[in-house]
Image: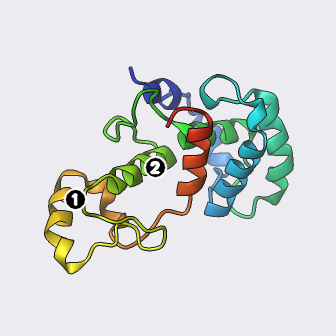
Amino acid sequence: MTGCDHFCFAKLPLNSTIAAAVPHAIWTPGDEDQLIDFLLDHHAAAVDEGNFKEVTFQALSALLTPLVAKGGPKTVQAYQNKWNRVRCFSSLYCDMFSIFLQLCHTFCVVQAIKNVLGWTWSDKTGASITHELEDSWAAYVHIHKDVKPFKHKGWHHLHKMEYSLVRAGVW
């Protein structure tokens, strides 16, 4: 089991009656920014491998839940789950085939693109594939389908994720 399996693939029971009655949390890029910013500001409270104690998530929830503009309320558990997806990593390497959760998976995909020889990453235009690189891109996308959205588009959270993972000493 990799680090990501351990941190991100917890199986939680779903009570369909409750799920139907309470609208689920919707995460906008702004919500994700607030989550990441808050936890970066409170990085001193981080414990083993970038985890935070529940009291930190309680403070986060108290501060940010009133600001929710879309979807149901974001509970302490919702913030913890989202952070686990954001910070999901393997302690030795980021294996994009074993990580299927949203933000960390995207971070790994972007890192893979940045490491392809001959390609240039831009925060605005992603892999910045030109006509000359089209064959190389097509071959790569054939094997790594998750890179497709980044042909001409960057990723909003890249620098925060790099900062967070480097600061935690895991990237």
In this figure, which residue is indicated by the disc labeled 1?
141
- Mark 2 belongs to which amino acid? Phe
Spot occupied by residue 155 in the image (x, y as percentages of width and height): 49, 62
From this view, report whether residue 119 is shown above or below residue 1: below
Q: Which mark is residue 107?
A: 2
Q: Which mark is residue 55?
A: none
Give the secondary structure at mark 1.
helix
From this view, report whether residue 28 is shown above or below residue 47: below
- Mark 1 belongs to which amino acid? Val
How far apart are labels 2 and 1 at the CA level?
Answer: 17 Å
Spot occupied by residue 141 in the image (x, y as percentages of width and height): 22, 59
Question: N-terminal of the two: label 2 or label 1?
Answer: 2
Total marks in image:
2
Q: Quadrant of the N terminus?
A: top left
Image quadrant in which you'd find residue 135: bottom left
Give the secondary structure at mark 2.
helix
Name the residue furthest top: 1
Q: Residues within 10 Å of mark 2 (few under 14, many from 20)?
A: many
Residue sitting at x 54%, y 48% = 162
Spot occupied by residue 59 in the image (x, y as percentages of width and height): 84, 39
From this view, report whether residue 72 is shown above or below residue 120: above
Spot occupied by residue 148 in the image (x, y as percentages of width and height): 30, 63
